[in-house]
Amino acid sequence: MTEDHGKLRISNADRDRAIAQLQAALDEGRIDLAEFDERAKTAYEAKTNAELDLIFDDLPGGRPKEGEVAPAGSPQAPVPSSGGRAPRGNLMQRFPALRGLVTVGAITTAIWAATWIGSGEPTYFWPIWPILGLGIATIMQVVGGSWGDRDDDDPDRERHGGHGPHGH
Protein backbone atom coordinates (compact mmCIF):
# COMPACT_ATOMS: atom_id res chain seq x y z
CA MET A 1 0.00 0.00 0.00
CA THR A 2 1.68 3.21 -1.16
CA GLU A 3 -0.98 5.63 0.08
CA ASP A 4 -0.37 7.63 3.27
CA HIS A 5 -2.79 6.29 5.93
CA GLY A 6 -3.39 9.77 7.35
CA LYS A 7 -4.67 11.12 4.04
CA LEU A 8 -7.28 8.39 3.59
CA ARG A 9 -10.90 9.39 4.16
CA ILE A 10 -12.77 7.85 7.09
CA SER A 11 -16.17 6.17 7.23
CA ASN A 12 -19.16 6.70 9.51
CA ALA A 13 -18.17 3.46 11.27
CA ASP A 14 -14.73 4.97 12.01
CA ARG A 15 -16.44 8.02 13.52
CA ASP A 16 -18.78 5.84 15.59
CA ARG A 17 -15.85 3.83 17.00
CA ALA A 18 -14.07 7.08 17.85
CA ILE A 19 -17.13 8.39 19.72
CA ALA A 20 -17.42 5.11 21.64
CA GLN A 21 -13.72 5.36 22.59
CA LEU A 22 -14.26 8.96 23.74
CA GLN A 23 -17.23 7.75 25.83
CA ALA A 24 -14.93 5.19 27.49
CA ALA A 25 -12.42 7.96 28.27
CA LEU A 26 -15.25 10.11 29.71
CA ASP A 27 -16.51 7.20 31.84
CA GLU A 28 -12.97 6.69 33.20
CA GLY A 29 -12.65 10.39 34.06
CA ARG A 30 -9.79 11.00 31.61
CA ILE A 31 -11.74 13.77 29.89
CA ASP A 32 -14.58 15.91 31.18
CA LEU A 33 -17.96 16.45 29.55
CA ALA A 34 -16.92 19.68 27.81
CA GLU A 35 -13.87 17.94 26.32
CA PHE A 36 -16.02 15.01 25.26
CA ASP A 37 -18.44 17.34 23.48
CA GLU A 38 -15.60 19.20 21.75
CA ARG A 39 -13.80 16.02 20.68
CA ALA A 40 -17.04 14.34 19.56
CA LYS A 41 -17.84 17.36 17.39
CA THR A 42 -14.36 17.18 15.91
CA ALA A 43 -14.81 13.44 15.27
CA TYR A 44 -18.08 13.98 13.42
CA GLU A 45 -16.47 16.74 11.33
CA ALA A 46 -13.28 14.74 10.59
CA LYS A 47 -12.73 13.64 7.02
CA THR A 48 -9.36 11.86 7.18
CA ASN A 49 -7.54 9.41 9.44
CA ALA A 50 -5.06 12.13 10.42
CA GLU A 51 -7.85 14.41 11.67
CA LEU A 52 -9.42 11.60 13.67
CA ASP A 53 -6.07 10.44 15.11
CA LEU A 54 -5.41 13.92 16.55
CA ILE A 55 -8.40 13.56 18.89
CA PHE A 56 -6.65 10.69 20.72
CA ASP A 57 -3.07 12.05 20.91
CA ASP A 58 -3.18 12.59 24.69
CA LEU A 59 -5.28 9.51 25.59
CA PRO A 60 -3.84 6.09 26.45
CA GLY A 61 -4.84 3.40 24.01
CA GLY A 62 -5.11 5.83 21.13
CA ARG A 63 -7.74 5.56 18.46
CA PRO A 64 -9.74 2.30 18.38
CA LYS A 65 -8.97 -0.21 15.67
CA GLU A 66 -11.56 -1.98 13.53
CA GLY A 67 -14.02 -3.90 15.75
CA GLU A 68 -12.78 -2.72 19.13
CA VAL A 69 -13.43 -0.04 21.70
CA ALA A 70 -10.93 -0.44 24.49
CA PRO A 71 -10.96 1.26 27.87
CA ALA A 72 -8.13 3.77 27.79
CA GLY A 73 -6.36 2.06 30.69
CA SER A 74 -6.05 -1.29 28.89
CA PRO A 75 -5.60 -0.84 25.14
CA GLN A 76 -5.15 -4.60 24.56
CA ALA A 77 -8.62 -5.51 25.90
CA PRO A 78 -11.21 -4.93 23.16
CA VAL A 79 -14.83 -4.51 24.14
CA PRO A 80 -17.12 -6.81 22.19
CA SER A 81 -18.85 -5.10 19.32
CA SER A 82 -22.59 -4.50 19.65
CA GLY A 83 -23.54 -4.44 16.00
CA GLY A 84 -21.90 -1.09 15.25
CA ARG A 85 -23.49 0.68 18.20
CA ALA A 86 -21.72 2.21 21.17
CA PRO A 87 -21.41 -0.15 24.14
CA ARG A 88 -24.32 -0.04 26.54
CA GLY A 89 -23.67 1.75 29.80
CA ASN A 90 -25.54 1.64 33.06
CA LEU A 91 -29.24 2.51 33.27
CA MET A 92 -28.60 6.21 33.90
CA GLN A 93 -26.57 6.42 30.67
CA ARG A 94 -28.97 4.31 28.61
CA PHE A 95 -32.09 6.19 29.69
CA PRO A 96 -31.54 9.97 29.95
CA ALA A 97 -35.10 10.41 31.26
CA LEU A 98 -34.19 8.26 34.28
CA ARG A 99 -31.23 10.51 35.01
CA GLY A 100 -33.55 13.53 34.80
CA LEU A 101 -36.14 11.84 37.01
CA VAL A 102 -33.62 11.09 39.75
CA THR A 103 -31.99 14.53 39.56
CA VAL A 104 -35.20 16.58 39.49
CA GLY A 105 -36.84 14.31 42.07
CA ALA A 106 -33.93 14.69 44.49
CA ILE A 107 -33.68 18.47 44.07
CA THR A 108 -37.40 19.19 44.36
CA THR A 109 -37.81 16.82 47.31
CA ALA A 110 -34.85 18.48 49.07
CA ILE A 111 -36.44 21.91 48.53
CA TRP A 112 -39.77 20.61 49.82
CA ALA A 113 -38.07 19.06 52.89
CA ALA A 114 -36.17 22.29 53.60
CA THR A 115 -39.38 24.31 53.53
CA TRP A 116 -41.04 21.73 55.79
CA ILE A 117 -38.17 21.95 58.31
CA GLY A 118 -38.09 25.75 58.03
CA SER A 119 -41.81 26.17 58.60
CA GLY A 120 -42.10 23.44 61.24
CA GLU A 121 -45.06 21.73 59.63
CA PRO A 122 -45.46 19.46 56.60
CA THR A 123 -46.73 21.13 53.45
CA TYR A 124 -48.36 19.77 50.33
CA PHE A 125 -45.91 17.42 48.57
CA TRP A 126 -45.73 19.41 45.34
CA PRO A 127 -42.62 17.57 43.97
CA ILE A 128 -44.99 14.75 43.00
CA TRP A 129 -45.91 16.64 39.80
CA PRO A 130 -42.45 16.94 38.20
CA ILE A 131 -41.62 13.44 39.49
CA LEU A 132 -44.83 12.06 37.97
CA GLY A 133 -44.21 13.78 34.63
CA LEU A 134 -40.62 12.58 34.39
CA GLY A 135 -41.68 9.14 35.62
CA ILE A 136 -44.08 8.83 32.69
CA ALA A 137 -41.34 9.96 30.28
CA THR A 138 -38.95 7.41 31.79
CA ILE A 139 -41.49 4.60 31.47
CA MET A 140 -42.13 5.54 27.84
CA GLN A 141 -38.41 5.55 27.15
CA VAL A 142 -37.84 2.18 28.81
CA VAL A 143 -40.85 0.56 27.10
CA GLY A 144 -40.04 2.09 23.71
CA GLY A 145 -36.33 1.37 23.99
CA SER A 146 -33.56 3.84 24.58
CA TRP A 147 -34.09 6.91 22.42
CA GLY A 148 -30.33 7.41 22.19
CA ASP A 149 -29.67 3.81 21.10
CA ARG A 150 -31.90 3.36 18.04
CA ASP A 151 -30.53 1.86 14.84
CA ASP A 152 -32.05 4.63 12.72
CA ASP A 153 -30.26 7.38 14.66
CA ASP A 154 -27.65 8.76 12.30
CA PRO A 155 -25.41 11.55 13.58
CA ASP A 156 -24.77 12.60 9.96
CA ARG A 157 -28.49 12.82 9.09
CA GLU A 158 -28.79 16.50 9.99
CA ARG A 159 -25.61 17.42 8.15
CA HIS A 160 -26.92 15.81 4.98
CA GLY A 161 -30.39 17.31 4.96
CA GLY A 162 -32.09 14.46 6.82
CA HIS A 163 -31.26 11.86 4.18
CA GLY A 164 -28.65 9.74 5.93
CA PRO A 165 -24.91 9.64 5.28
CA HIS A 166 -25.16 9.63 1.49
CA GLY A 167 -27.50 12.60 1.04
CA HIS A 168 -29.98 10.73 -1.23
Image (spheres, grey):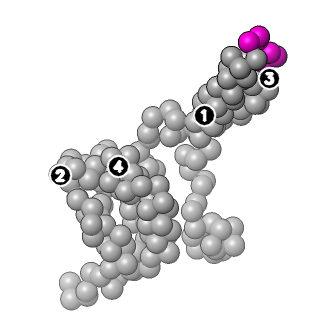
Location of residue 2 in the rendering, given as x and y in whole percent from the top left corner: 21, 89
Q: Is residue 162 magenta?
A: no
Mark 4–mark 1 Cα distance, whole angstroms, equals 21 Å
What's under tag 3, amino acid-wise? Answer: Trp
Q: Is residue 123 magenta?
A: yes
Location of residue 14 in the rendering, given as x and y in whole percent from the top left corner: 39, 66
Mark 2–mark 3 Cα distance, whole angstroms, equals 52 Å
Residue range in magenta is: 120-125
Count of numbered circles in the view = 4
Q: Nearer the viewer, residue 41 or 143?
A: 41
Q: Earlier in the sequence, mark 3 or mark 1?
A: 1
Crowd band around label 3 with a 10 angstrom C-alpha radius: few (<14), some (14–19), many (20+): few
Q: Earlier in the sequence, mark 2 or mark 3?
A: 2
Magenta segment, principal secondary structure?
loop
Q: Nearer the viewer, residue 53 or 30?
A: 30
Residue found at the far right of this picture: 124
Closer to the observer: label 3 or label 4? Answer: 3
Give the quarter of the image for residue 99.
Answer: top right
Q: Secondary structure at mark 4?
A: loop
Which of the numbered marks, if any, corresponds to residue 103? Answer: 1
Q: Secondary structure at mark 3?
A: loop
What's under tag 4, amino acid-wise? Answer: Gly
Mark 3–mark 4 Cα distance, whole angstroms, equals 36 Å
Q: Earlier in the sequence, mark 4 or mark 1?
A: 4
Crowd band around label 1 with a 10 angstrom C-alpha radius: few (<14), some (14–19), many (20+): few
Residue found at the far top of this picture: 121
Q: Which residue is mark 3?
A: 126
Q: Residue at x 27, y 70 (%)?
A: 57
Q: Which residue is mark 2?
A: 76
Which of the numbered marks, if any, corresponds to residue 29? Answer: 4
Give the quarter of the image for residue 141.
Answer: top right
What's under tag 2, amino acid-wise? Answer: Gln
